[in-house]
Image (cartoon, rainbow, N blue to C red):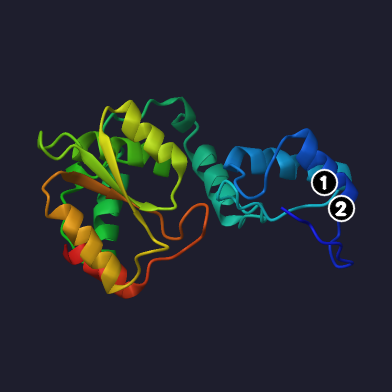
Amino acid sequence: MKIENNNIFPLDLVYVKKELQDLEIDLRNISIRELNKLVDQLSNHFGIEFLRFEFGVPGLMPSNIGPKEEIRILSENPKASGTYPPFDGISRLKKATADFVKNFININVDPKCCVPTVGAMHGGFICQSIAGRIRPESDTILYLDPGFPVNKLQTKFLGLNEASIDLYDYRGKKLVDEVDKYFSTGNVGGLIWSSPNNPSWVCLKEEELEGIGEL
């Protein structure tokens, strides 16, 4: 990829090109981990901060609400950090999750069916393992791409099949119709996408979300 000289660009392009060469990186097909390594190198060398989106964490200063609440909880209940949580989740959190689903998408869910996880990767893994095995014939996970590659590694690890729809080619009603076509085969056990998507940061439109939800 050709990098043009630009006075606005705050980095020494000679050094950037050298790093790309030394790391054997092609910006046209760079992976997330390669990008992370490159940005770390540039940040350390030039002493500047980057907005980090390669792992979905921008690096902005977080609100102090979270740390203050954690400190308060640990101060009021010193045993909290030394207590093993219930396997199926904390009852209060499970109920709050059910309330959120009701308020957000108006669906009644039993709190016992709400299982807290430690992030989207953990949640996605659990959802795939359940959705891909509920029915023997529905062992395929459908992806709306581009998406996070590690999710597909989870699919392979679980021994499930995968199918893909490229969002570049399908948007709006065309996307909903294509999803419907896959669903109608009876082979799809689950659908995975991120909104905004990682790494392209594409958001699904309201009508797309509604159409997929109705399916």
Give residue 134's quadrant in the image: top left
Helix, strand or loop status at disc 1: helix
Amino acid under disc 1: Lys
Amino acid under disc 2: Leu
Give residue 166's quadrant in the image: bottom left
Q: Which mark is residue 96?
A: none
Which residue shows up at 29% across the image and 36% down it? 126
Which residue shows up at 78% across the image and 57% down it? 3
Q: Position of residue 186 (x, y in %)?
A: 11, 47
Which residue shows up at 24% across the image and 54% down it? 98
Give the camera-side residue of 38 and 26. 26
Residue at mark 1: 17
Q: Position of residue 189 (x, y in %)?
A: 18, 44
Q: Where's the C terminus, which quadrant? A: bottom left
Give the camera-side residue of 13 and 49. 13
Q: Is residue 199 left or right of residue 12?
A: left
Q: Is residue 103 visible?
A: no
Q: Which mark is residue 13?
A: 2
Q: Is residue 122 visible?
A: yes
How many other residues sit within 10 Å of disc 1, few (<14), some (14-19) or many (≥20)? Answer: some
How many other residues sit within 10 Å of disc 2, few (<14), some (14-19) or many (≥20)? Answer: some
Image vertical order of residue 132 relative to residue 159, above or below: below
Q: Is residue 158 left or right of residue 112?
A: right
